[in-house]
């Protein structure tokens, strides 16, 4: 009797299968390091963070190569700085400038050294240990405590991602002249971003969209066309203005939350680890011990430039919004069209086009980082493998986390939230979630048992401590004003 073809034997893995879902449902053999990397990625030319070579270019190499060499120094720090000016940042700074005028201009210069110190600390921890923040935090602190911190990060990231998705879709509606509704674009935008993440490396995504964020420099040019009051601008820049009101405290928490966002902590560290892994200088989960002084010098320069870029854009968005919107009595910005009006002195009737391009470009840069940083944090906490350079078929668990974060953001947009208002609320949530997580990272950086000679010095402890302290006080003050009415 004919019994049919015998069943095909399952392929035997070359070593233990590293992904739990693949091991359970589809035990494809564990790939070599070359097979694991996406075929269309450019990691032979670009490391995971975006630098042109696997591993850091040294300062000596940069000097020898000239302008190209200096550009090769820029990687995770530059990407982190650019992604910090995501739609949440644009929406927050526009609302702050329109509502308070020049009153919060001083925050751009004030937050620059603080966010630089925080990102330098996250980078230094990653370079020292060779693993992401989730793994390092879990090794030092109780699992339940780290779990609570990461749960807060996931909640903040989901809301942030949803708000950014809504903002990108709102930019699309603005470009179409209202013919295409915002809600119609949510799913296509999410599908586009997931497709890029699943099938292309982040280095490639960064190459495509980083130029779109240059549209944000329109705010820098518009500020001069708007003819702001020079004496008022200088005073507001260097003399802090404070108010004991609910709206002002909420605005201050939002500014701190969107400049020193918790998702940036994990993205900076994971990007550094990806660069080390691309250069063969670390291994997943086990990491390495010690960092080279040359690596740290280059990372610090990269971070300094990235944070300077971020704060420059922040300063001029607030300045332009104050000079154009606040000065003309437009203090309550609720729609993307109203926010775009800040660029009218430069772009005139085409202001909505410039604003939309900036909003879409920054969103397409920021949303993948939000989803990826949440996935990195969770997989590191759970001790799993996976990154944006890996093929989804070999690391399905990581990509399911990535898709889940994006889909949660999509679902949020069907709750009829106002996109521009949601961006501001997102910044407030980040400002509340960041302090406890930042305190854990500061304690980790000061631990000489883990950090050895790379433990935080006085300057790092002072600046990061000020950042954590101010964000904590601002969050407490916000809760106090809400309770007091």
Image: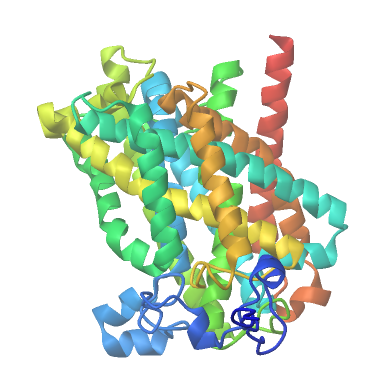
Residue 104 relative to residue 214: left or right: right
In this view, the residue in front, 333 or 394, is: 394
Picture layout, residue 483 above or below residue 411: above
Picture layout, residue 254 above or below residue 272: above
Dividing the picture into quadrants, the one containing residue 187 is top left
Dividing the picture into quadrants, the one containing residue 180 is top left
- Residue 88 seen anywhere in this rendered image of the structure: no
Image x and y of residue 61, in percent: 37, 89
Question: Looking at the image, how many numbered discs can be counted on the residues?
Answer: 0
Picture layout, residue 153 above or below residue 289: above
Q: Which residue lies furthest to the front in this view?
A: 1
Residue sitting at x 31%, y 58%: 210
Q: In which quarter of the image is the C terminus?
A: top right
In this view, the residue in front, 103 or 426, is: 426
Residue sitting at x 67%, y 73%: 131
Residue 269 relative to residue 318: left or right: right
Residue sitting at x 58%, y 32%: 428
- Residue 53 seen anywhere in this rendered image of the structure: yes
User: What colouring method underlies this structural image?
Assistant: rainbow
Image x and y of residue 15, in percent: 70, 88
Q: Quadrant of the N terminus?
A: bottom right
Picture layout, residue 136 above or below residue 46: above
């Amino acid at each position: 009797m004919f019994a049919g073809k015998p069943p095909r034997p399952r392929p035997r893995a070359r070593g233990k299968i590293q992904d739990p879902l693949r091991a359970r449902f589809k035990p494809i053999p564990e790939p070599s390091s070359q097979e694991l990397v996406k075929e269309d990625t450019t990691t032979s030319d670009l490391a995971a963070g975006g630098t042109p070579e696997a591993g850091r270019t040294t300062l000596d190499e940069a000097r020898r190569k000239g302008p190209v060499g200096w550009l090769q120094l820029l990687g995770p720090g530059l990407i982190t700085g650019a992604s910090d000016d995501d739609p949440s940042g644009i929406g927050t700074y526009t609302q702050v400038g329109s509502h308070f005028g020049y009153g919060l201009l001083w925050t751009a210069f004030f937050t620059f050294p603080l966010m630089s110190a925080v990102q330098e600390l996250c980078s230094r921890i990653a370079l020292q240990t060779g693993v992401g923040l989730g793994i390092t935090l879990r090794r030092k602190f109780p699992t339940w405590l780290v779990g609570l911190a990461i749960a807060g990060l996931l909640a903040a990231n989901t809301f942030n991602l949803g708000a950014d998705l809504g903002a990108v879709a709102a930019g699309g509606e603005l470009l179409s002249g209202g013919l295409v509704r915002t809600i119609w674009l949510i799913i296509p935008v999410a599908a586009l971003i997931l497709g890029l993440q699943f099938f292309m490396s982040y280095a490639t995504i960064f190459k495509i969209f980083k130029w779109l964020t240059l549209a944000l420099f329109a705010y820098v040019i518009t500020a001069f066309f708007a003819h702001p009051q020079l004496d008022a601008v200088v005073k507001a820049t260097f003399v802090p203005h404070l108010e004991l009101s609910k709206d002002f405290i909420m605005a201050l928490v939002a500014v701190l939350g969107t400049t020193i966002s918790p998702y940036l902590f994990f993205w900076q560290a994971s990007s550094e680890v990806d660069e080390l892994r691309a250069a063969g200088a670390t291994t997943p989960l086990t990491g390495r011990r010690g960092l080279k002084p040359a690596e740290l010098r280059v990372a610090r320069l990269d971070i300094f430039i990235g944070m300077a870029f971020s704060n420059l854009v922040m300063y001029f968005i607030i300045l332009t919004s104050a000079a154009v919107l606040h000065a003309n009595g437009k203090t309550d910005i609720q729609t993307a069209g109203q926010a775009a009006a800040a660029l009218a002195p430069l772009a005139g009737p085409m202001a909505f086009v410039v604003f939309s391009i900036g909003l879409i470009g920054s969103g397409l840069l920021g949303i993948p980082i939000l989803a990826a940083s949440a996935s990195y944090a969770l997989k590191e906490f759970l001790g799993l493998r996976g990154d944006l350079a890996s093929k989804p078929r070999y690391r399905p668990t990581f990509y399911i986390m990535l898709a889940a974060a994006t889909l949660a953001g999509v679902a949020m947009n069907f709750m009829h939230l106002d996109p521009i208002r949601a961006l501001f609320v997102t910044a407030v949530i980040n400002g509340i979630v960041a302090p406890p997580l930042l305190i854990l990272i500061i304690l980790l950086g000061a631990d000489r048992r883990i950090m050895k000679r790379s433990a935080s010095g006085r300057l790092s402890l002072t600046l990061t401590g000020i950042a954590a302290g101010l964000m904590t006080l601002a969050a407490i003050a916000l809760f106090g004003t809400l309770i007091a009415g």
